[in-house]
Amino acid sequence: MVAISATDRVFVLTGAGVSAESGIPTFRGVNGLWRNYRIEEVASPDAWRHDPRLVWEFYSMRRRVAASATPNPAHLALASLEQKLGERLFLCTQNVDDLHDQAGSIRVVHMHGELFKSRCDTCSRAPFRDTNTYDPPAELPRCDCGGRIRPHICWFGEVPFELDRIFRALDECTVFIAAGTSGVVEPAASFVAHVGGRARTIYVGAEEPANASAFTECHLGKAGEVLPLLADSIQ
Ligand code: NAD
């Protein structure tokens, strides 16, 4: 495994696989969490327009699952990497759970939003912390402006958050690490191609991702076992 030097600028992209060992099912895994729902019926602007109750049922279920999860060694390793590298580590997650934050990572960029935040679908009120579950037949939450309160999630067809900051960090990094992500969901799947040829690119995950050929190194294994080794390799 290539060691990371203390002068490197490291960009880490995490995906659902990093939270799998904490008991949160991945998107493409066989676990029942997603199997009972058609993703376009619960995670898209169209779904929100047509059936906000079903959308809240789905996100309420995800909030319940995530509320009982705790960080695993992968989250802890990335928090300790931040302590060593400071602002030379840029941690970008596709995960909407708060396990990186719980593990002690301070500067986490949640490009797909945060499960425990909501916002108004009509006014510009800032996203706010919200751990409630809204299951039918309860009334769905409304903003003071009359708009509907929706999950603070980037749905399919919406633009991920903080892309300007993310691409600046990609342009500056010398090491790019992707962990536990299948390399299918865009634009994150193309980050490795964006830095390729200039930065060292490392994949960590249970199996080869769809974009495996774009990485200079692939370390197959559980994130909770491989990421601590990588974090410890800092000289
Ligand atoms: P994905 O489900 O498409 O892929 C998960 C990847 O993790 C797979 O390649 C799998 O081999 C790997 N994996 C499974 N267990 C692992 C382990 N213990 N260690 C390392 N790797 C492991 O996930 P994705 O690429 O992140 O894309 C799915 C989308 O769904 C994202 O947009 C994300 O926002 C969302 N999602 C988020 C969560 C969460 O917040 N925890 C959970 C499920 C899905």
Image (spheres, rainbow, N blue to C red):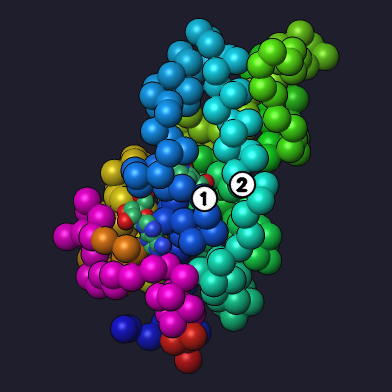
Image position, residue 180 (x, y; %): 39, 58
Relative horizontal placement of residue 131, taking residue 183 as reference (left or right): right
Quadrant in the picture for residue 229: bottom left
Instruction: Say which residue label 2 marks.
Output: 66
Per the model, the C-alpha gap separating discs 1 and 2 is 7 Å
Instruction: Say which residue label 1 marks.
Output: 24
Q: Point out which mark residue 172 bears.
A: none
With respect to residue 144, does 226 lie above or below? Answer: below
Image position, residue 138 (x, y; %): 73, 15
Q: Residue furthest left?
A: 213
Q: Is residue 57 visible?
A: yes
Which residue is at a point 53% across and 11% down the rendered structure image? 51
- What amino acid does circle 1 point to? Ile
Q: Does the magenta-highlighted stretch encompass residue 216?
A: yes
Write the start and end of the magenta stretch as one range: 208-231
Considering the image in quadrants, where does the N terminus appear? bottom left
Callout 1 environment at 10 Å: few (<14), some (14 to 19), or many (20+)?
many
Q: Does the magenta-highlighted stretch encompass residue 179?
A: no
Callout 2 environment at 10 Å: few (<14), some (14 to 19), or many (20+)?
many
- What amino acid does circle 2 point to? Ala
| Residue labelled 1 has its Cβ within 8 Å of some atom of ligand 1 | yes
Disc 2 element: helix
